[in-house]
Image (tube, grey):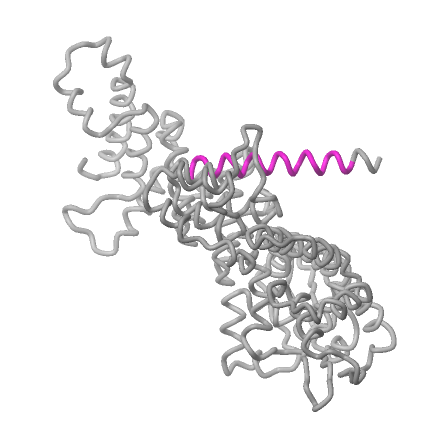
């Protein structure tokens, strides 16, 4: 049974990696971002020994190249794969990006959620902390209990046991404050491997054993046997990626066990009598309550953490303002989610960057992401809609168009227009298409004689694409007499589709 599970996980990873390679080949940067966020190895190779970075550079997709480098792809010009990427690059611009890329900086490349966790330490002021380690000379290291409990079984035992009521821990005089500080940074996914000094390695190794960081211990052992700077940097980058993926799994387990499984449920008005203050004294040691009402009228709440929720610009603005929520010790905030699954997708993204969005709730996730100003999650929801084969069995293409307009998602506007163009005979008689065209026309704030209707323009564009035609060949419709040529080229079918569209526009009252 265990072997079957492992085998299935490997198959899923292989499938995801191949999907990433395809996204890099065609330049789909949003989908590539979604796939990378699953934890797939960006430095892997396919059956032809092509890495995602090589495919993106070879095919000339500059934004995908930049994304891959930000997410940890290694381009070492002194090694075969790196040289292959550079000299195989389709454009000089991409080649220059790769040539300027310094592998020694690769240790600073992290997943977005890891960047946020690191920023809690690197910004210079640990906000909303609830515990401190105190050293000699009153040197203090503030931390969040939930982060330490999620990342280390040792701290989890302590905070659930003898340290449950403590606000600080005074460290023994023999403690190395600098090395301990580096270990705390490691817990927050700050890349510290290049900062480790030789005289600190013994103390760091002992801490790794005590706190349960076997992967860090393994790295320290391996790096002792590597002297080549390029190989050391590559090893450092590889392990930082592993640390991030492992930490992500730890945070997922902590969130599921302590936030999702401990959600609060209550009847109407009951939450006003609840004492939220005691929540800081027990897992998940939260300092904020998110409450919402489902479409069935059920009321639920999750105990969360301000330090995580500020990944959303909505919460970041809220807690940096003079609003009551920013000054309250345990603010209770209503979330516009109508399903448990939607709320948990949002929290999963904020805590550990999960972008696995079920297609059935993708529209709901997109809407709440727009409300919370989490643009990346909104993009991932849009990608889910465009990638799902089942989505249009439950929703209509006009549902997609509505949410595309209301949430300003250009990707979905084009997806809807392309879908309508590809099946124009079916949609041309649908009154919802007429309504959509009228709505698109009203979206032009100040109409002029030269104004065009965006939806109609997009449909015309995708009709050309449908028959693999270029705009300059359309002149042949009026000048070419060879019917066989017109049929083979697709021009006649294109003309039929355009005439259907023009007829509808004339019926609506637009001059085409």
> On screen, 475 above or below 440?
above
Where is the C terminus found, in terms of image quarters? top left
Expressed as whole percent of the image width and height from the top left, the position of residue 298 reads 69, 60
Expressed as whole percent of the image width and height from the top left, the position of residue 310 reads 56, 69
Whether residue 230 appears in this view of the structure is: yes
Residue occupying the point 53% across, 39% down? 20
> On screen, 124 above or below 51?
below
Residue occupying the point 37% across, 45% down? 94
Start and end of the magenta stretch?
A: 5-27
In this rendering, position of residue 482 left or right of residue 303:
left
Residue at the extreme left = 479
Residue at the extreme right = 162
Quadrant in the picture for residue 331: bottom right
In this rendering, position of residue 506 left or right of residue 348:
left
Residue occupying the point 59% across, 72% down? 120
Question: Which one is nearer the viewer's eye here, 347 or 46?
Answer: 46
Quadrant in the picture for residue 248: bottom right
Expressed as whole percent of the image width and height from the top left, the position of residue 332 reads 64, 74
């Amino acid at each position: 049974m265990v072997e079957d599970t492992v085998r299935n996980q490997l198959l899923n990873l292989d499938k995801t990696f191949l999907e990433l390679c395809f996204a890099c080949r065609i330049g789909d940067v949003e989908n590539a971002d979604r796939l990378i966020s699953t934890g797939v190895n960006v430095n892997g190779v396919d059956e032809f020994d092509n890495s995602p970075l090589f495919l993106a550079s070879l095919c000339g997709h500059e934004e995908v190249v930049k994304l891959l480098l930000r997410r940890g792809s290694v381009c070492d010009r002194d090694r075969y794969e790196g040289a292959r990427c550079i000299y195989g690059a389709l454009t000089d611009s991409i080649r220059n990006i790769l040539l300027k890329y310094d592998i020694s900086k690769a240790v600073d490349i992290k997943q977005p959620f890891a960047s946020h966790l690191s920023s809690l330490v690197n910004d210079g002021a640990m906000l909303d902390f609830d515990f401190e380690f105190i050293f000699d000379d009153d040197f203090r290291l503030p931390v969040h209990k939930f982060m330490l409990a999620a990342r280390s079984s040792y701290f989890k035992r302590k905070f659930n046991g003898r340290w449950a009521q403590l606000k600080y821990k005074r460290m023994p005089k023999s403690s190395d404050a600098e090395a301990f500080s580096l270990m705390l940074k490691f817990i927050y996914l700050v890349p510290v491997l290049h900062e480790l000094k030789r005289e600190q390695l013994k103390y760091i190794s002992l801490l790794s054993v005590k706190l349960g960081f076997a992967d860090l211990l393994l790295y320290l052992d391996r790096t002792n046997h590597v002297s080549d700077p390029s190989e050391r940097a590559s090893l450092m980058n590889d392990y930082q990626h592993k640390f991030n993926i492992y930490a992500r799994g730890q945070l997922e387990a902590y969130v599921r066990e302590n936030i999702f499984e401990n959600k609060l449920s209550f009847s109407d008005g009951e939450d006003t009598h609840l004492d939220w203050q005691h929540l800081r004294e027990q897992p998940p040691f939260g300092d904020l309550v998110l409450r919402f009402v489902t479409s069935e009228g059920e009321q639920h709440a999750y105990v969360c953490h301000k330090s995580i929720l500020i990944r959303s610009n909505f919460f970041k603005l809220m807690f940096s303002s003079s609003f009551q929520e920013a000054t309250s010790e345990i603010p209770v905030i209503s979330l516009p989610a109508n399903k448990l699954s939607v709320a948990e997708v949002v929290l999963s993204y904020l805590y550990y960057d999960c972008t696995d969005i079920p297609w059935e709730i993708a529209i709901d996730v997109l809407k709440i992401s727009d409300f919370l100003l989490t643009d990346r999650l909104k993009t991932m929801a849009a990608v889910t809609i465009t990638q799902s084969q089942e989505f249009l069995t439950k929703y209509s293409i006009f549902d997609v168009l509505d949410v595309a307009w209301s949430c300003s998602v250009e990707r979905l506007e084009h997806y809807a227009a392309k879908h309508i163009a590809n099946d124009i005979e079916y949609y041309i008689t649908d009154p919802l298409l007429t309504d959509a065209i009228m709505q698109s026309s009203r979206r032009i704030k100040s109409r002029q004689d030269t104004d065009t209707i965006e939806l109609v323009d997009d449909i015309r564009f995708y009709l050309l694409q449908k028959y693999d035609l270029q705009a300059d060949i359309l002149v042949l419709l009026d000048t070419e007499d060879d019917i066989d040529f017109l049929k083979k080229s697709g021009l006649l079918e294109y003309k039929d589709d355009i005439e259907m569209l023009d007829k509808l526009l004339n019926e609506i009252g637009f001059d085409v």
